[in-house]
Structures are given as structure tokens and as C-alpha cells.
Image (cartoon, helix red, strand yellow):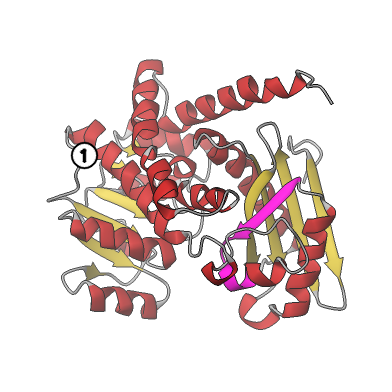
Amino acid sequence: MDVLGSGHEQVVFCSDPGSGLRAVIAIYSTALGPALGGTRFYPYASEEAAVADALALSKAMAYKNSLAGLDLGGGKAVIIGDPGRDKTEALLRAYGRFVESLGGRYLTACDVGTYNADLDVVARETRFAHGRSEAFGGCGDSSVLTAFGVFQGMRAAAQHRWGTPSLAGRTVAVAGVGKVGSHLVDRLVADGAAVVVTDVDQRAVDRLLARHPKAAAVADTDTLVRTPHDVYAPCALGGALDDETVSVLPAEIVCGGANNQLTSDATADLLRKRGILYAPDYLVNAGGVIQVEDERHGFSFARAEAKATTIFDVALRVFRQAEDDGVSPAVAADRLAEERMRDVGRLATIRLPI
């Protein structure tokens, strides 16, 4: 793996044998500000797989923060291990000391396998842990605004495709009804959509169906992507959209909360060729990072929600730009994010008085 050729500013390997900590912190860019990105705690098959995930996720965070209009760069951390078995106070605090050692170049928060309470522990060793629990002055669960942002992106896609910013009367297939997916279903049902879901955790499905008995459930993702629906919403782990999946999708729109949904650039082109409107994942799932960023200023949910509402307008801009340029929305979104990183990031070269 060519880490030095990845375009990242810094990649840090963290090891503390006493606590069992094995982690990677990847900083893709600080052009717009400190690199903000969550900490993923996951049982990777190999160190190489962990590094690859950290590199991909940190780059996506740089683009996400740029497109969201935040004065933040992009980074990500991964802790190698089973969070249900390996997560301890000592490990989290050891990780916090490594985050602190970067002096604010990297700001961490929650991700898969980590929660507000974990960040409270990490914060005992670093000033740069965010997404903390409300009891400690934090913003609490960021999945609420993440789902809200995805819903705004889906409304924009509906406006662009069908001429109305509503999912009423449409069927939405949601893959993954954990933290983000379940909140998204709440929004969809309230908007009048029919919902069909699946999840590898049957308990998550059962909780969802208890709350929304009119929703339907299928056994697995393979079945879901072949079930008739208008919108496909991947809300679990990345890599949800490969060529095989796209080739059988009945959806007219893909818009979900999962990170890194496309397995390759060619997949975005295939979606476009099939006439499926793709809402870039890092654009529509930015509600969570908007919520976490607001914590730095003394958290206000109303202020963060108002900022997340702008995802609707940015998504419309991306869809229109893609049509004008004859490219996929993924390419159009990348161009807009890169433009801001270049143009605003350049201002750092103007020296200010000491």
C-alpha cells in the first residue's frame, strides 16, 4: 500500500501494548482547518485493511467538511479490535493521549463502534475529543442530525427527479436500521413514504417494526435491492454500491447515510448510465459532522439543525452542476469540494500580523 503516495498530510500509527491499543490516525487535509473525523472501532482482518479504511474515510471527511461549508479539514481514526470485547477505559485513555499529542491537528468524534460515553473517556486525556454526551456539555447523539441531513438530500433528489421535494407515495428501501437508518425511517414515515428495511441485526429490525408496524422487512440486502422501490438508502457500512448491485437496482434515486458507498469511480458512471440519480454520500450524511462542529462553539441543536437544512440546497446545486457538465453527481460534488479547499485554503498563505 502506497501510504506516502495517497495525498495525505500525515498518518500516525498508535500502539500501547499495556492496554492493547492498536490504532491508525489519518489526516488527509488541514487546508480549511483542523482535521475532524470520527474514531471507528472495528475488528479489521489485517493492519493493511485498517490503514486502507483510515485513508479512504479521512479523505471523504475532508470533502464532506468542505462541501458542508465548515472551516475544517478531514481526518479519521480506526482502532483495531472488537469493541464489545476489547474496549476498556485504559485503551480509550491511551488513544486520547495519542490524539492530544497531535496538538489539535486532528479532532476526533464518534463513528462505528464508538459512542458519546466513549468520547467522554477519551476527553479525559485530550482537549480534542468532540461528540461528547450532553451530561458533559457535548452535543449528544449525532445520528439524529445525520439522518436529518440524509432526508434533506433525499428531498432534494426527489425535487430534481420528480419535481416535488417529498417522498409521499414513494417506496424507500433502507439497508441498515441502526442509529442513522432508524431515524431516517422516522422522517420518511412522517413524510408519507412506504418503507421496506433490512439489517444484519434482527433486533434492530424488530425495534423498527415495533415503532412502525406498517413498514416491511426482508431477510437480507440481496433481497432488498431486488424488491420494487423508488429510492435506495444504504445506511450500513461502506461499499454498498458495486456494479452487480447497481445493475439490478429498480430505484430511480440512491441516497443513504453510509460512508464510501461506491466501490469505484466506474460505479458512479454506471448509476448515471442506468438513469439512477446518485446523491453523494459525503454530501447528504454531513448532518452529524455539522452537529459535532457546533459543539465547539457551545452546542445549540437549533443552530446545527438550521445549518444541516442547507444540505437540501447544496444537493440541488450538485445535481444541476452534474447535468450541466455531463458528469455524475459524484464528480460534480468532488469538484465543488476541491474548489473550496483550494480557494479558501489558499488564504492561509496570506500572513497575518503576530
Q: Which residue, given by chain and number where applicable, does mark 1 sit on?
A: 165
> What residue is at 65 percent from the left and 76 percent from the top?
82
Percent x, y for residue 307?
Answer: 42, 41
Percent x, y for residue 96?
Answer: 76, 64
| 335 or 88, nearer to the observer | 88
> What residue is at 63 percent from the left and 51 percent from the top?
37
Q: Is residue 224 left or right of residue 178?
A: left
Q: Secondary structure at mark 1?
A: loop
> What residue is at 30 percent from the left and 48 percent from the top?
249
Q: Confirm whether residue 35 shows in the render.
A: yes
Percent x, y for residue 286?
Answer: 47, 46
Membership of 111 in magenta stretch: yes
Q: Is residue 301 left or right of residue 253?
A: right
Among all residues in the image, which is located at the extreme left? 169
> What residue is at 35 percent from the left and 46 percent from the top?
255
Graded by Cα atoms within 10 Å as few (under 14), some (14 to 19) or many (20 or more), the crowding at tag 1 reads: some
Q: Is residue 70 left or right of residue 81?
A: left
Percent x, y for residue 330?
Answer: 46, 33
| 72 or 55, nearer to the observer | 72
The range drawn in magenta is 105-118
* Residue 215 in the image: above or below residue 327: below
